[in-house]
Amino acid sequence: MEVIKTAIDGVVIIEPRIFKDARGYFFESFSAREFEEKVCKTTFVQDNESFSSYGVLRGLHFQKPPFTQSKLVRVIKGAVLDVAVDIRKGSPTYGKHVAVELTEENHRQLFIPRGFAHGFAVLSDEVLFQYKCDNFYAPQADGGIAWNDPDLGIDWRIPVDKVILSEKDTKHPCLKDYDSEFDINIPLY
């Protein structure tokens, strides 16, 4: 696998080595040994999957301390714009984001460390999205930042009138109105 650094330290794109022939293709989607060597040491404890249609926007979500999560996300079918926002107070990249297109064709994955809000917008007719988490989901620790926070300046690449949100995702505050429990000293994983 190839690890591609992004503009924010700790957030990385992972490209697998793909072996293609007349039968189709094969690739190793995850190797704990290689991940530890090239990205970081972490133990994923939960796998999640979601299915969505065009225009669905999920995010920007995070788990509050002490239930913070790192995520390794990928698309099985379709395409998304995947976004990670640094919400660690005192970080030189606080309020900045990384946006990466993940598709069934490019097989890319994005690693989002702890201390980041995460979301994605569905760009294809349908998407099957999978992700690994290094901590169990804790509903009492749910947190979120407004997907359309003007200070974040995220271009979700879908028209605003086509965005489909959950009720919960319509109520998140802007980052400037969120008293972050994350600071620069939070371990990334």
Image (cartoon, rainbow, N blue to C red):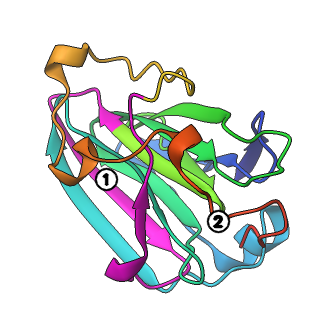
Do we see residue 28 in this rendering? no
Q: Position of residue 102 (x, y in %)?
A: 45, 37
In this orientation, which residue lies closer to the viewer: 39 or 136?
A: 136
Residue in view at x 39 percent, y 28 percent: 148
* Relative vertical location of residue 151 with respect to residue 60 in this rendering, above or below: above
Q: In the image, which residues are magenta?
A: 121-148
Looking at the image, which residue is at 83% across and 70% down?
37
Residue beneath the point at 79% across and 41% down: 5
Q: Is residue 20 magenta?
A: no
Q: Quadrant of the C terminus?
A: bottom right
The label on residue 129 is 1
Residue displayed at 31% across by 53% down? 129
Q: Which mark is residue 114?
A: 2
Q: Label 2 amino acid?
A: Arg
Instruction: Give left or right: position of 26 versus 165.
Output: right
Q: Quadrant of the N terminus?
A: bottom right
Percent x, y for residue 108? Answer: 53, 43
Instruction: Identify the image quadrant of residue 163.
Output: top left
Who comes first in sequence, dot 1 or dot 2?
2
The picture quadrant where one finds residue 160 is: top left
Which element carries disc 1, helix, strand or loop? strand
Callout 1 amino acid: Phe
Residue 49 pos. (x, y %): 27, 64
Q: Which sits in the foreground, 73 or 56?
A: 56
